[in-house]
Amino acid sequence: MSHPTNLPAWQALQKNFEQTRNEHMREMFEKDPARAERYWLEVGGVHVDFSKNRINDTILANLVDLAKQSGLQERMQQMFNGEKINQTENRAVLHVALRNRSNRPIKVDGQDVMPEVNSVLKRMGEFAHAVRSGEWLGYTNQVITDVVNIGIGGSDLGPYMMCTALEDFGHPRLNMHFVSNVDGAQLRDTLEKVHPETTLFIIASKTFTTQETLTNAQTARKWFLKEGSEKDIAKHFVAVSTNKKAVAEFGIDTDHMFEFWDWVGGRYSLWSAIGLPIMLYLSEENFIEMLEGAHEMDNHFINTPLEKNLPALLGLVGIWYINFYGGGSQVIAPYDQHLHRLPRFIQQLDMESNGKQVQMDGTPVQTETGPIIWGETGINGQHAFFQLLHQGTHVTPIDLIASLEKRSNLPGHHEILLSNVFAQAEAFMRGKTPEEARAELQAQGVSADRIDALVSHKTFSGNRPTNMILLDRLNPRNLGSLIAMYEHKVFTQGVVWGINSFDQWGVELGKQLAKTILAELTNTIDPQKHDTSTSRLIRLYRQVNCAEDGTCDLLK
Ligand code: F6P
């Protein structure tokens, strides 16, 4: 497989980099004020100003050429047509089918997947309606008040993020809980807040083999059976999975299972039955709105020339920093309290997709790949880690995300919030020159000696890239579009790097080793050969948790 570094566009970009690396965005804006208008795209209710990036028309044209020479458009067609582009798992990648509101046939192995997609969506809708309306009753004929989603990774992060983000649309009777950690503290804390008679558990696992989820699910089941009986389980436990057999073995009637398919990646699954908590909380109509928003972004992505293609351009501008500036991290900073889980969601989406070291054909990559994604609500970040973003030594692109419409009717709050996000973008771009810092200190009457000592500390280099991502308002449709935008951004980057964005073999080794270590911690096998550090850790654990006769806290 050829490496992106061998493509003519890559070499052209390398030259662009040498020529422009010392140019400052301040001057770019002064010379070309129209860039604010040119580097601005809107799709549905999502507006993106990407003008505060270290780019110009030539760089953008070469980035678009890079995408073309990497075969992005062909790969997009293959994904949307259900071809098995996840080669290492021999699977299609069809989260776009889950929100294919046009209902055009999409075939996998000659079979249209849409009838099944629609049928599961219909069942989810019926179930959500029954729970929300109070028609679905618990074993003592009480309505459901609490929903506990037990899942991890993609079976947790998406629904959790969406339910948190769209809380304003949530059903007033339903309290949503998300349990992912196998640390018993999380499940215990949750169970203390709920009652078996009024709680619905959703056991969400694509594979239904994930140790953390199954352990939590078993414990929840035992807790339930202290008050309810086996036959009551049907009213309080449902499963979401691709693995019918394992669901049945666990003891959940497969009539109470909502299915999805191996062509839905875990981190791309919130649009599938994994989104059941979202539908329960927000309603079927709002879930469909979310799908509509994503579909609008899908249509934009597949139909728009790359020069005006929002997810593709965001991906390409990201590559510009990662591969040419050596900026290996990316901050997600939502200026919205309800979006506080968004950075974590995008972290899995991006890092599990593009954290790869070999190309499709198994040969090592020759460039950096996926960035380290991190972040927090922007306003809190300003008072914590933004110092490094302004004056540290790294080039860290930042996505600033906010909604234009007021988020509460509390006077003054939204204006302060939005003035901050706009000001941060301006500050990151402009910086403050030593002359400006000096003039400011002089105006404050600071002594000459003190000014000399302070000027360099009060200087901001600026020239730090941001994307300003504004939603008309935070609603299911716009959030659907936003998430789909990030999915396609990640896809674009993966295609340019020639990697498989849809497998995740890197998570396996730890899981494998943990099996042996678990047997050692519980004394069910003799100590195994490890490095001395690992052996010492195991011994220490056993000293604390095992009795002298060698009996340990066994998993019961
Ligand atoms: O271990 C990583 C992973 O496989 C993720 O890719 C996935 O989202 C998560 O675990 C949960 O998997 P499952 O839904 O099969 O329980």
Image (spheres, helix red, strand yellow):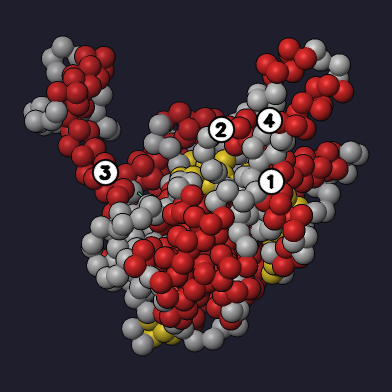
Question: SS class of the residue under badge 3?
Answer: helix
Residues at marks 1 and 4, CA–CA distance in whole angstroms: 13 Å
Question: SS class of the residue under badge 2?
Answer: loop
Q: Is residue 197 visible?
A: no
Q: Is mark 2 within 8 Å of ligand 1?
A: no
Q: Is residue 109 above or below residue 550?
A: below
Task: State if disc 4 and disc 3 touch (CB < 8 Å).
Answer: no
Residues at marks 4 and 2, CA–CA distance in whole angstroms: 12 Å
Q: Is mark 4 within 8 Å of ligand 1?
A: no
Viewer-nearest of discs 1 and 3: 1
Q: Is mark 3 within 8 Å of ligand 1?
A: yes
Pinpoint residue 271: horizontal percent, then vertical percent. 54, 64
Residue 429 disc label: 1
Viewer-nearest of discs 3 and 2: 2
Residues at marks 3 and 4, CA–CA distance in whole angstroms: 48 Å
Q: Name the side, left or right, on which 404 lies relative to 211.
A: right
Residue 392 disc label: 2
- Which label's residue is closer to the chain start, 1 or 3? 1
Q: Considering depth in this image, is 397 or 209 the residue closer to the camera?
A: 397
Residue 511 disc label: 3
Q: Considering depth in this image, is 556 or 421 the residue closer to the camera?
A: 421
Task: State if disc 3 and disc 1 touch (CB < 8 Å).
Answer: no
Q: Quadrant of residue 515?
A: top left
Assign the C terminus to one quadrant of the image: top left
What residue is at 31 percent from the left and 57 percent from the top?
A: 366
Task: State if disc 2 and disc 4 touch (CB < 8 Å).
Answer: no
Viewer-nearest of discs 4 and 2: 4
Residue named by callout 4: 459
Residues at marks 1 and 3, CA–CA distance in whole angstroms: 43 Å
